[in-house]
Amino acid sequence: MTGEAHAAVEFQLSTPPDLVRRRRMGRIFELACLVTAAAGVVVLAVLLVDVIVDGAGWLNRTFFTRPPSRIPTRAGILPALAGTIWLMSLVALISFPLGVAAAVYLEEYAEKGWLQTIIQTNIANLAGVPSIVYGILGLAVFVRWMGGLTGGRSVLSGALTISLLILPVLIIAAQEAIRAVPNSIRDASYGLGATKWQTVRHHVLPNALPGILTGTILALSRAIGETAPLIMIGALTFIAFTPEGPRDAFTVLPIQIFNWVSRPQDDFRHLAAAAIIVLLVLLLSMNALAIWLRNRYEKEW
Amino acid sequence: MSSSVLGAVSSRTARERLVRAVVTAAGGVSILTTIGIVVVLVWESIGFFRRVSPVEFLTGTEWTPLFQPQHFGVLPLLAGSVLVAVIAALIAIPLGLGSAIYLSEYAPRQLRAVIKPTLEVLAGIPTVVYGYFALTFITPVLRHIIPGLGIFNALAAGIVVGVMVLPMIASLSEDAMFAVPRELRQGGYALGGTKFEVATRVVTPAALSGIVASFILAISRAIGETMAVVLAAGMTPNLTFDPRESIQTMTAYIVQVSLGDTPFGSIEYQSIFAVGLLLFMVTLAMNIFGRWFLKRYREEYA
């Protein structure tokens, strides 16, 4: 006992050689962790540079105003860009009300109990289902069973499929935004004689709106790059026109990119890179908008 | 009370009921989605398994549905998915965990402000873009290093999928480390531990269930990854664990069939549902398992 106590005193008085070694280990470890953390940044930088170098020179008037063509210098992304805008607008129209309503149900209406637990667990599990499985669902349900209604391999079928795909993410984000509204607001509203729906409509939702919008935009920015489920439901890879209505055939930017990347000729690779630049600019502007909304309207309660 | 007030109250009640019904229905959509997925996959798979025995499907080593003689042994596709996921894990686990430890224990605020958003952007890049990156950058680099490597190979696909799931490991693991109570860290320092020792012997073990959950969820994501694998790994069902070879994953097969014009109801058409069902069950099992781990640490330090 006394020997150990003695050693402890000595430990404090002089830096033991052991500690020098341990501290050096620590510095090496910190450096190793820094390198791994920097790896992500480096990869992103390389990816962006790679795409810009390959594609920037192809971003001209023709590229934005023409349909794809067998001759690379005459090929453009007009139908794909129009298809993406169509698809995203429909997805927003379908998924936003549905997602917000589901979140309102789970946060404001559902009684705590087995049903709520099942729905909540189910949503978490759906968020992990591979996107291609949603494509299989869309193919069977929206293209085949409901083909008469949706027009089969149409932009509407695609929008319904992608809406189901992003709903779990959207619901979870909307729930968090609704949960962040303090109960005192609700109590004050009830105290003034408001009903549940009046409280939700005039107090909870307006206060949660910036958070809900941020979550929705982030969910849509995920949807804009989705490829596999749309290939499943048959978004055509070759299409020379823009959709006129929700029941029309369509293609989207990611599918156009896939189509061009799959070809061996270098020129098509460059077209693909140019289309990727357009896609990433759209995606990153959506992210920037979401961040701006969050910073601008975020409330401290 | 006058009748007009009563009328207003009853119309208010009617509206309350209507709203409740509408939001409940919206909540039910998620349940319907799950039921839809299961019914569609099982229904069409039954048709498939009437023609191909489940035993042949699960144990067969040849997958040649698109040419004669047709064989429907799913093992080559399963092996392809597993191979890509293993390579992805070898890349993403050390990089992701290292990033998480750095962000949670070491990073000065300015660096954190750069690394965190970068990882978020990395997580949001569409998978077809990663496919392009694999094909036009990673594969050419690999071909310099490994002579004789084909244009399509499992290695490039695995690496790029690893980059894709890295942010998921980093962010979930960092959350788990962040949740470790300060008292545990301070206890470590009080016993004379260096920062390194506290990070690796106190914080990491304390956050282990969350870290393991992040690995499982990331590997599940890697198995479900599609476009990057379609573009980089090729379309060759191949029962191999050699990363230099071209392979086909379950997801890539499903895409391949839907790119061609396979008639509805044919055995090729039904086969995508059988493969989809297998994919769904594998990923669902991993997700449930992973989230069970997550719940454990959240309960521990709640």
Image: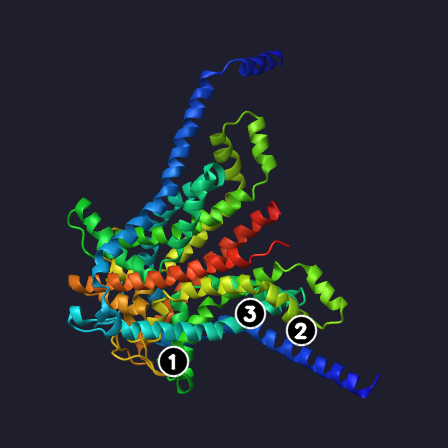
SS at mark 1 in the image: helix
Amino acid at the residue labelled 2? Trp
Tag 3 near tag 1, CB within 8 Å: no
Q: Position of residue B285 (x, y in %)?
A: 47, 59
Q: Position of residue A60 (x, y in %)?
A: 22, 66
Tag 1 near tag 2, CB within 8 Å: no
Quick one: label 3 or label 1, which is nearer the N terminus? 3
Q: Dot 2: within a 10 Å radius of its alpha carbon, few (fewer than 14), some, or many (20 or more) residues?
A: many
Q: Which residue is mark 1?
A: A143
Quarter of the image where one finds residue B188? top right
Q: Chain of mark 3?
A: A
Give me the disc on residue A100: 3
Residues at discs 2 and 3 both on one chain: yes
Instruction: Examine the rendering and report whether any part of residue B237 can be seen.
Output: no
Q: Which corner quadrant holds the N terminus of chain B? A: bottom right
Between residue A248 and residue B260, name the one nearer to us. A248
